[in-house]
Amino acid sequence: MRKFFYPKLAAMNIWKNRRVYVPYILTCICNIAMFYMMFYMNANPDLTTVPGSEVLATIMFLGVVVMGIFSLIFLCYSNSFLIKRRKKEFGLYNVLGMEKRHIRWTLCWEMAYVIVISYVVGFALGILGSKLLFLFLLKLLEVPAQFGFIISGEAMSGTCFWFLGIFILTLLLDMWQIHLASPVELLRGGNAGEKEPKAKWLLALIGMICLGSGYYIAVSTTNPLDALLLFFVAVILVMIGTYCLFTAGSIAVLKMLRWNKKFYYQTRHFTSISGMIYRMKQNAVGLANVCILSTGVLIMISGTVSMYAGMGDIMNTRYPHDVEYTVQGSGKENFGAAVEDRIVSSAQEAGIEIRSLNSYNSLSFSTVGSDGNLELLDYSSQAIGSINAADLVTVAAMTLEDYNRIMGEDKTLGGENEILLYPVKGSGDLDTLTIYGKEYQVKEVIDSCPYVGEMSTYVGGGYYIVVKDMAQLEELEALETAVYGDMASHVERVVQADLEGTAEEKEAFETSLNGEIDAMSAEQFSQETDLSYRADMKQMEYQSFYALYGGLFFLGIFLGVLFLMGTTLIIYYKQVSEGYDDRERFEIMQKVGMSKKEVRQSIKSQVLMVFFLPLLMAWMHIAFAFPMITRMLSALNMYNVQLFALCTVVTAAVFALVYAAIYGVTARTYYKIVEGI
């Protein structure tokens, strides 16, 4: 054959099949661009200068892994659709005298064109988009923009090698299919349908059981830690149930519709239902894929948006005070007083107004139990492994004198075993609280306490109790020490301060104060060897929080867009495939008297039934998953359920509008194919 025969034939084939090739090439371009951008974010040296860079690097690496796996699966899926549409064409070449090795050479040249176009356009978009994406991330993190333009060689080479591997894999799969198929099979390949499937009631029952089990886990799980552990179990069950119900349940529903003679023998219903039943096995898998991807988009975007929008609430929950020092050891009273004095003097020097300054003694320790009956932990190697983390309950205690002074209350406790109770995480409907056999009478359940910050991060339950006096607090300490020994916690001196001023002024003050306390502690530590302290500075922690929640928000939006792109292309390919399969059938219908208007009505009926079922199913998945996701978010200190509900509703509404727009485009494409336009 002539020297340029294969390149010309390959170019001509791509042009003639542009209706299916253009979406495939666009898919390759988008995947390459997005993979490069995510790889660039992970490999960008400027990222190391951003506060919380370690957390961001982990999040970006996770994005690279997810993006790579998605690209592999989705490009293989897209290519399988493409090669199916072209089997008849290759069979015709084979019948006309081209050997299979010639067809393989043609495939190689077609793939070469795809690679060149995808790499050139994909890298161009990726390089331009990576800078914009990095600036967007810095904006989310509230970090000053860094100007300059960097092309990452590591990201470019990694992207080249990964997608070259994917392209070679798809080419080998195509060649293998051509090698195995006979000319007759190739000629029939594009039209290869399936026999009418039977209604598989057992599979439908399995689907209902799996879906119901997944929903039950999502609704009934109340502990945040259990929600984190069982979430993926529920996801797997719901995915299995979705595939089974779309595959078996949809066929059963369509056959029941066919049994309804009045409904079935309407022109638009007859053609659409009969066609859907005939190919429902293949169609159902595509619909299930769309449903699962749509659910993933809704969960990722609504969850990450709500966390980012509620970050102020999360910070205030975790760090209720601007400055907090927790001191342990024999010299804690003196060191705590010195810390208070230094806060006052440093604030005066910095011109910062102190809104409140308090100190008190506190004791916190871990227990296990429920319903107000708490036991101390057995730290033996045999017992520690059998403890369910969800059963852990943290108890913190302070004296009545400190509570009344700080909260401005005038509460009283009569007996030695009377307490005030504040449930941080757990039931407040308790008359008694038993700790290691000692019973305390709950005189009152209070609605606030001065120290809940760190306890809010614990995944188990938590109670804050107010005891009568220091003797009662020391009795609790002795009770705990008798069981825990060297692992016991001890009474701590807590110093808390709230400041007036801008975020920048507070951060500067906290940084300066921290250095002064460190210098002051050096001398104190030489005198009191068991003295130690911990500092929590709200403004100094903001950057690490922005790195975590801003990074998760960024990744959620990025992967949400990625999955939305996948959803769109699956729908498009499915509609194009159905259009080509239905063209001949509708031509026959028109020849026997069916008008173009009736054809359009039939198309609309079929597309509506197929198209919006996954969206409705995705909404149902989200509705049942909502309670479980709120528990998971509470483990990340996100307790604003109303905000998450609002984000979920808005995300679902926006997604529905995008979904409807996709419907409009694919319906027109489907109609054009059926009409032969």
Image (cartoon, helix red, strand yellow):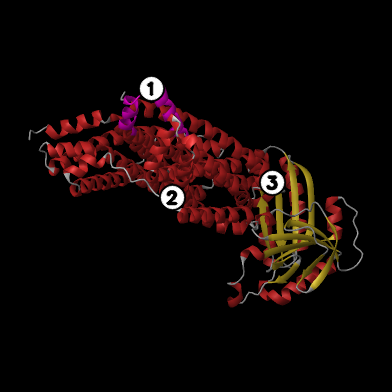
Instruction: Give the residue number, with chain letter if any, for mark 3.
Output: 316
Packing grade of label 2 (10 A; few <14, some 14-19, many >=20) is: some
Q: Which residue is mark 2?
A: 199
Q: Of helix, strand and loop, which one carries label 3?
A: helix
Does any portion of residue 608 appear in the rendered image?
A: yes
Q: Residue at x 29, y 33 (%)?
A: 21
| Badge 3: residue crowd in 10 Å (few <14, some 14–19, many ≥20) | some
Q: Quadrant of residue 40?
A: top left
Residue 126: in sight, yes or no? no
Vertical comparison of 358 with 604: above or below: below
Residue 380 lies left or right of residue 40; in this view the side is right
SS for dot 1? helix
Residue 651 picture quarter: top right
Task: Please tell me whether mark 1 or mark 3 is closer to you in this view.
Answer: 1
Name the residue beneath numbered marker 1: 596
What is the x, y in percent for residue 243?
45, 49
Q: Residues within 10 Å of mark 1 (few under 14, many from 20)?
A: few
Q: Are the residues flagged by discs 2 and 3 in contact, CB closer than 8 Å? A: no
Dot placed on the residue nearer the N-terminal end, 2 or 3: 2
Which quarter of the rendering shows the C terminus? top left
Tell which circle, 1 or 3, labels the residue nearer the N-terminal end.
Answer: 3
Closer to the camera: disc 2 or disc 3? Answer: 2
Residue 591 lies in the magenta stretch: yes
Does residue 33 lie above or below 429 as drawn? above
Question: Residue, x 90% and y 56% (percent of image)?
Answer: 411
Distance from Cα at disc 1 to Cα at disc 3: 63 Å
Q: Position of residue 197 (x, y in %)?
A: 38, 48
Residue toward you, 173 or 420: 173
Residue 65 percent location from the top left of the image? 41, 49
